[in-house]
């Protein structure tokens, strides 16, 4: 384990992160990186499952893909934002589409950062810590 | 025959001419001489005074003779006959001869000129009809307006595209002819812009019950007679299809980049995890290596499929058609797929016709198509299922039919029309296997584009799918 992730592990104990992606390898690699850094990780393989898990698990942060079956990542975040129980959940979007988020979309969905695939798990972890440390 | 007094006659002619000239107020033209009406009148008056009333009777006689002579004279004949009949008329006859010669000459020239003009008219009419035919045959809509924004010319395509009555449009204000306010404004602005020889190209959308169409509107000024802007020509070229193709290309590139990034993202992430020492033991590291290997393979397959489809679509692919047995091709593909099927506990049933029947095909491509269909059957059929591979010969219609039937997940009816589209994936079955969304698109290209065959799919959710294709049988 690197120094960075050890530090992060200490700082982020008991923080829960929901990872949603229809690519099993991405789910696997992201959750492994986060678990190694001390986070609790739950995973969903499509937008609908992500929505259900967000309600039941109430994570501190969601990392979601954009293009997914059933429900897109953007729509998932929008719905969570609309409901009082989940409106506080911050989100990071991880997408292979060259997709730019407008300020209105960012406001309506609570998406704090956009990362594009291929991505660096190291950079993703740093971004997770950054977003969790930001003021609400 | 009576003798005619030439002087009396000359006087008579002058008197008559002067009276006429005064009456009309115009000069009298005699040959190339132009005698003013007033001088003629004066000359006439003097002659009358000189000759006196005694001449009247003689003049009357001679007048009658002259009238009779003119009435009976054939213009084509020489008037010397008049001289023969009445010798005193000799000089008059000669001058009439001269006059007739000039008249004949002029008539000839006028006739020539008339013929020339007739030819010019015919040429001009033919050119006008030709230009009109060109204008009407144009698929582009053409509308010409004048200085007052009135329609002076339009073709049928314009009437059809902009929905107006062609016959009633002529000389009507353009804002009454067209409902499209934006287009009217464009024409007006162009006319007001006063830009000589200038051109404006604007993209313009027109919505009709048939749907929305995109036009490239080219506006140019027509010069008037004195160099001012005399009107505007608007040409509307339909670019709807071009825009759609551009959009499709854009979607394709966007989909390709998404599909390529996905396996690349896994490779990139796992390699970094290995570098960062995130694999805690050798077993995990091995797992990472294996993922990197399969994702790299996936990426390679994806690139191959994209290139193959693109080559087939652009007609660049080299096709080597030879008589082949579909049964042999099916057997080769089954051999390759069998280990994967065994792993999933699937059984493969062969119902193949004798290898004797042949079809003209590119063996490698046909093999690729069959392999893609078989690979899909294995991917989407759960444990313990059956895959049936059939060939059938329809000698009556000269066809050979291939079928790959499975007892798999099936395809929902809403997805069926799109399964052969590029990058289309059946959402409901997405979880069952990874795919590029290009395999079936390639199969259709190989069967239909390369071999002029036909591919069909029949499916029931939960029961399975059957992909069948027809190829021409070698005679």
Image: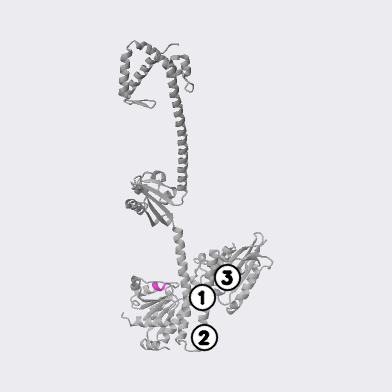
Residue B93 at what x, y percent from top left? 44, 19
Q: Earlier in the sequence, mark 1 or mark 2?
A: 2
Q: Which residue is mark 2?
A: B286
**Tags 1 and 3 on a common chain:** yes
Q: Residues within 10 Å of mark 1 (few under 14, many from 20)?
A: many
Separation (CA) of disc 3 from disc 2 = 32 Å
Residue B394 at what x, y percent from top left? 65, 62
Q: Earlier in the sequence, mark 1 or mark 3?
A: 1
Q: Please, which colouring scheme is shown?
A: one colour
Helix, strand or loop: magenta stretch: helix
Magenta stretch, residue numbers: A71-75
Question: Which chain letter goes with mark 1?
Answer: B
> Residue most toward the front?
B91
Q: Which residue is mark 3?
A: B373
Residue A58 at what x, y percent from top left? 37, 80
Question: Which chain letter goes with mark 2?
Answer: B
Question: Residue B24: in sight, yes or no?
Answer: yes
Image point (47%, 44%), residue name = B130
Residue A48 at what x, y percent from top left? 42, 74
Choose between B180 and B47: the one closer to the eye.
Answer: B47
Q: Earlier in the sequence, mark 3 or mark 2?
A: 2
Q: Residue B84: which disc? A: none
Q: Residues within 10 Å of mark 2 (few under 14, many from 20)?
A: few
Instruction: Say whether residue B53 is left or right of residue B427.
Output: left
């Amino acid at each position: 384990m690197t120094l960075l992730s050890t530090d992060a592990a200490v700082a982020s104990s008991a923080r829960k992160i929901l990872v949603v992606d229809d690519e099993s390898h991405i789910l696997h690699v992201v959750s492994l990186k986060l678990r190694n850094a001390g986070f609790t990780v739950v995973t969903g393989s499509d937008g609908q499952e992500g929505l259900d898990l967000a309600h039941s698990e109430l994570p501190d942060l969601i990392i979601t893909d954009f293009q997914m079956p059933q429900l897109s990542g953007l729509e998932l975040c929008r719905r969570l934002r609309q409901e009082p129980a989940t409106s506080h959940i911050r989100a990071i979007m991880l997408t292979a589409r060259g997709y730019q988020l407008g300020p209105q979309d960012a406001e309506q969905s609570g998406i704090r950062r956009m990362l594009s695939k291929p991505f660096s798990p190291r950079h993703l972890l740093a971004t997770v810590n950054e977003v969790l440390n930001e003021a609400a | 025959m009576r003798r005619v007094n030439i002087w009396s006659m000359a006087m008579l002619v002058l008197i008559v001419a002067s009276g006429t000239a005064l009456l009309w107020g115009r000069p009298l033209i005699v040959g190339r001489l132009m005698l003013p009406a007033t001088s003629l009148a004066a000359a006439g008056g003097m002659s009358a005074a000189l000759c006196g009333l005694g001449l009247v009777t003689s003049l009357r006689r001679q007048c009658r003779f002259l009238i009779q002579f003119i009435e009976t004279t054939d213009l084509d004949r020489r008037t010397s006959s008049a001289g023969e009949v009445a010798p005193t008329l000799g000089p008059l006859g000669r001058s009439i001869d001269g006059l007739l010669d000039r008249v004949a000459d002029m008539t000839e020239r006028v006739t020539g000129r008339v013929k020339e003009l007739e030819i010019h008219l015919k040429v001009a009419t033919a050119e006008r009809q030709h230009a009109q035919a060109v204008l009407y045959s144009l698929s582009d809509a053409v509308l010409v307006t004048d200085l007052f924004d009135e329609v002076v010319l339009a073709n049928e395509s314009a009437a059809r595209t902009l929905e107006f009555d062609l016959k009633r449009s002529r000389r009507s204000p353009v804002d009454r002819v067209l409902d499209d306010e934006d287009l009217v404004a464009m024409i007006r602005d162009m006319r007001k812009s006063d830009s000589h020889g200038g051109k404006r190209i604007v993209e313009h959308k027109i919505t009709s019950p048939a749907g929305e169409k995109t036009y490239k509107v080219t506006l140019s000024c027509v010069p008037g007679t004195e160099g001012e802007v005399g009107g505007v020509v608007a040409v509307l070229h339909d670019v709807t299809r071009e825009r759609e193709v551009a959009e499709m290309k854009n979607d394709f590139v966007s989909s390709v980049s998404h599909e390529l990034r996905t396996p690349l993202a896994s490779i990139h992430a796992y390699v970094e995890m290995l570098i960062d020492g995130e694999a805690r033991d050798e077993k995990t590291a091995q797992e990472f290596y294996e993922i990197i290997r399969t994702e790299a393979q996936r990426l390679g397959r994806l690139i191959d499929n994209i290139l193959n489809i693109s080559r087939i679509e652009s007609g660049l692919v080299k096709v080597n058609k030879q008589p082949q047995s579909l049964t042999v091709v099916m057997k080769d593909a089954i051999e390759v797929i069998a280990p994967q099927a065994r792993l999933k506990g699937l059984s493969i049933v062969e119902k193949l016709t004798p290898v004797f029947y042949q079809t003209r095909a590119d063996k490698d491509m046909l093999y690729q198509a069959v392999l893609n269909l078989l690979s899909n059957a294995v991917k989407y059929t759960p444990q313990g299922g059956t895959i049936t591979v059939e060939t059938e010969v329809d000698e009556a219609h000269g066809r050979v039919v291939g079928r790959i039937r499975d007892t798999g997940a099936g395809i929902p009816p809403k997805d069926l029309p799109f399964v052969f589209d590029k990058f289309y994936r059946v959402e409901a079955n997405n979880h069952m296997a990874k795919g590029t969304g290009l395999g079936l698109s390639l199969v259709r290209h190989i069967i239909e584009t390369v071999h002029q065959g036909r591919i069909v799919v029949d499916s029931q959710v939960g029961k399975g799918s059957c992909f069948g294709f027809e190829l021409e049988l070698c005679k």
